[in-house]
Image (cartoon, rainbow, N blue to C red):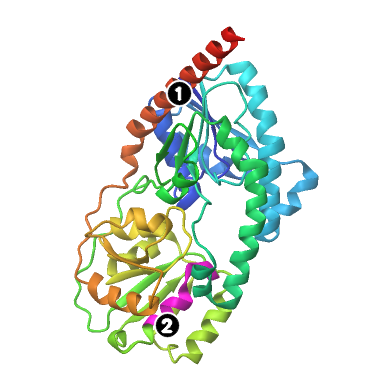
Amino acid sequence: MKILLSAYACEPGRGSEPGAGWAWACAAATRHEVWVLTHETNREALTTALAARPDIVDRLHPVFLRNPLWLRPLRRRGAATRFVYYLFWQLMTCRRAARELHRGVGFDLAHHLTYASDWMPAGVAQLGVPFVWGPVGGASTNGPRVWALLGPRGFVSELVRARILGVARALFGRPTARAAALVLAQNPGVAATFAWHPSVAVEPNIALRGEGALPVRSADHSDAPVAVFAGRLLALKGLRLAFQALCRPEVESWHLHVYGEGPELRPLQRLAARRGLAERVTFFGHRPQKEVHAALADAQVMLFPSIRDAAGWAVAEAIEVGCPVVALDRGGPASIVGENDGVLVPVYGDVSAGLAAGLNKARGLTPRPGHWNSDRLADLLDGYYRRAVASGADANAVDARKASLQ
């Protein structure tokens, strides 16, 4: 089949969205001829990576796009303005390029891949061919009772976000879902919001080991055990809950190594000092992915108390290096962490006590890596594409029957 992918983020050697874009595009190209609409800033990395992939270089065709000049300053500012830039990229730049390319190529299927949120549009959704949307994230079943775990600042942030995204879902998300022959949801919570849709599958956008093996797990011989957190430092990531847990006497020997940057960095540093944790909590800032993987391989546990992560790349990476995970029973981590992979802590009741108990319990677990390997994607995507084409054919047959009765 001739496949058109929309992957704004698509860059080899990167985790999360850019890494997923590259890994899934490569997987699609092993069975099909693929054109991928991506941002201009990915040109150098993709060109270099494709030159090293003779198996797909003739079947994977990047198309590099950039918004008009008057919109480009938005991309260099804060997170809110970058979302506006991306919104215009989908509504204008990607949509126009997709339609022009479709007239020349004649695609069999379109797939919106990276930065697929249930409240954002997809520029490849209305081409008149079967459309796959996702893996889609964004939806959350959290409410005020869960938001309260994040403190006043986090509560207000989640409240405002919920109100704004509710409007955006009505404007963009639901019409995009209606256009899809198949919706891929990043976790069961997201899938539940599309219960009305005739074709939904759960699939996190995780693809590890696409660029080489992860480090080997170290033996646990530490008298001062270390937990690692990796991610952007935002209120929703729950590090304040982690600090509350570290203050409990049953985990007084534990240390926490924090990898990442974000607006919560300074407040968290001050909070650690006030709680007497300055010598037990170390902030490493943003570090290369390989360094974070090595830290996970050396740590006793990964501590990830986020209340809202659609998938949880860092959680899957920890499991793949054999590091057990302690996470809240919410969102993506709840569907990624298996019985031997770690401990899921309920968000109701004494959460800090649950996290503390989870640290000591998870230390004795041995995760089984291998499930999230990118090698699984070629068969997976081929099956999803054939399912979408069949769903599209069924929908056309229904429309034809309705037309014949009128």
Is residue 88 visible to the viewer in this orientation of the structure?
yes
Q: Which residue is mark 2?
A: 244
Q: Residue at image x 39%, y 32%?
A: 381
Which element is circle 2 on?
Answer: helix
Toward the viewer: 382 or 126?
A: 126
Number of residue marks: 2
Considering every residue shown, the one lying at the far right of the view is: 70
Q: Earlier in the sequence, mark 1 or mark 2?
A: 2
Q: CA distance from mark 1 to mark 2?
A: 49 Å
Is residue 53 shown to the viewer in this render? no
For disc 1, the marked residue is 391
Q: Quadrant of residue 382?
A: top left
Q: Is residue 40 left or right of residue 12?
A: right
Q: Nearer the viewer, mark 1 or mark 2?
A: 1
Q: Is 126 or 2 nearer to us in this picture? A: 126
Residue 217 drawn in magenta: no
Q: Position of residue 300 (x, y in %)?
A: 27, 72
Residue, x 35% and y 42% (percent of image)?
A: 374
Q: Is residue 80 above or below residue 260?
A: above
Q: What's drawn in magenta, residue-wise?
A: 235-245
